[in-house]
Image (cartoon, rainbow, N blue to C red):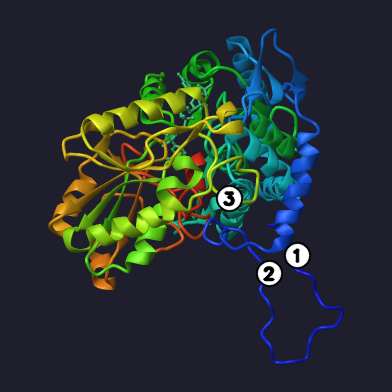
Amino acid sequence: MPFKTKRPNKPARTAKPAKRAFRLTYATMFDPPEELHTNFERALARVKADLGREYPLLIGGTERLAAAKFEDHSPINRGWVLGVFQKGAVQDAKDAIAAARSAAPLWSGTTWQQRVKLLRKAAALITKRVFEFAAADALEVGKNRMEALADVQETADLIAYYCDQMEKNNGFEKPLRNDPLKGYTAHNVSVLRPYGVWVVISPFNFPVALAGGPSGGALVAGNTVVFKPATDTPWTGYLLARCFLDAGLPPGVFNFVTGPGSTVGQELMSNPDVDGITFTGSYDVGMRIYQTFAAGKHPRPCIAEMGGKNPVIVSRHADLDRAALGVFRSAFGLQGQKCSATSRVFVEKPVKEEFVRKLLALLEKTSIGDPTARKNWLGPVINEGAARDFEGFCDELRQRGTILFGGRRITDGALAEGFFCAPTLAEAPEDHRLWKHEMFLPICLVAAVDSLDEAMRRANDVDYGLTAGFYGSTKEAQWFFDHVEAGVCYANRPQGATTGAWPGFQPFGGWKGSGSSGKSAGGLYYVQQFMREQSRTLVS
Ligand code: NAP
């Protein structure tokens, strides 16, 4: 984060420990320095004064306009037109793939050191633009300011992390043992080499990190990229594309196309000239892409990061204040629209009532409204469809279950212009379908259980396996890590029961129906997925 604390002119000679510069992550965002607010507010005013511009496609390094357009409206107030975007057609997707194909030999032939240099430049530009970028993210997705700033900063950190990995591994060129040949000398090397053209399709909820992270990984590994953002978030996608292009990537190395998933997205996943794809989004679309992609002439890598139905287990030995705070932040942060959001809580019977009481006390104090305003923690859900789904799920819970808090849309005053939904806590019978269905909304289910074994059985009894949380003793936490089926696990964390991963600290990837690769973003084994191994034996 480009946030410098003021240094005294002369270094202090006292033994006082130096004040650490603030470093933004999802775990530190609850207590930012004052200047961060001031900078965000200034940037927000600048960005709001310039709404409604038209944005092009970026193909082969040039701007292109399409015949059809669409408006990007803010979920905070549907009357705010953020920008006008190109409704790309199938031919635009084909042209973007062709541009990426013709740039591929140049880019894969560029030294990895040069690619790292350019990508570090892109990461630095993202950081430099973080406040304007985050203001756009907040307006487009309905994130609060800290969530928006973190989404942007995480993107720069992900790209930097993949650059670090390239450097630490010498560009993945590694000497091997030379086989003992009588009369000859063998020289054996393992080299990881790029696949060629890589497609990146991102979801609406982290439109910067989940586009910039995979793109950064693919690019630094030597692939050229065609990127399509979600239709709800083209603006942040364009701002990201500008950072890559302004960093000096050669024409065609990074291409940006907007347009419907059903046409542009469909072409990107079915075009035989694509060598690899990273999709992040729902299980249904992800599995369709995974299967379609496998139907090509030969196998090609498909990294599909999909949904979650993330459980939290609270033991009778838990610190219940921590547990309630962690669940509150993870179930309702970003209006429950995180793939890592807590959606199911299993609490041991003796502490269930007290846990729920503490959670309700936090819910009572939740501030909802325009999330760009400092005082509001919760904003709107992404669109009218999501708000209608929210109402439908609440009806289902009223019919079979009990709503303990929330359960209604909020339409007071100016909020009627957006898609605001009350954070909702409910109980439901064990066979209620919503225990297994990803709602992706601010709705969390809670149940009492007789034992930790029962909690674990229910926690694992879903098709997903993304994140999971636990509150209890250290010994119990170890048992939880060993038994829970999830890629990202936390124990006793007040900053978030199941949310808040950061590159290099918590690699992020799903098991089961939540992810296809078993390797995690921002982790030790991620960037290698964008390359294939070639062993080289030269005999002299
Ligand atoms: P989504 O509806 O699946 O859309 C994701 C992306 O796929 C969008 O860009 C969408 O474009 C595109 N798409 C839709 N249909 C397509 C098709 N037939 N062919 C190719 N592309 C197509 O997901 P979302 O609502 O944006 O995001 C929420 C979901 O993402 C949740 O399930 C959440 O759990 C998951 N998610 C997972 C992770 C993770 O790391 N595992 C992270 C974040 C979110 P259009 O918008 O134009 O339709």
Q: Amino acid at mark 3?
A: Leu
Q: CA distance from mark 2 to mark 1?
A: 7 Å
Does residue 370 appear to the left or right of 343 in the view shown? right
Question: Residue 482 at x, y = what percent?
Answer: 24, 60
Q: Residues within 10 Å of mark 1 (few under 14, many from 20)?
A: few
Residue 288 — which label?
A: none
Question: Residue 236 at x, y = what percent?
Answer: 65, 34
Question: Residue 31 at x, y = what percent?
Answer: 59, 63
Question: Residue 249 at x, y = what percent?
Answer: 73, 37
Q: In the rendered image, which quarter contains the N terminus?
A: bottom right
Residue at image location 55% in from the left, 52% down from the top:
173
Secondary element at image label 3: helix
Query: Label 1, on which residue?
Result: 4
Q: Amino acid at mark 1?
A: Lys
Return the residue found at the far top.
Answer: 67
Query: Label 3, on which residue?
Result: 158
Look at the image and tell me whether residue 181 can be seen. no
Residue 21 — which label?
A: 2
Q: Are marks 2 and 1 in contact (CB under 8 Å)?
A: yes
Q: Are marks 3 and 1 in contact (CB under 8 Å)?
A: no
Q: Does the residue tagged 1 have its C-beta within 8 Å of any atom of ligand 1?
A: no
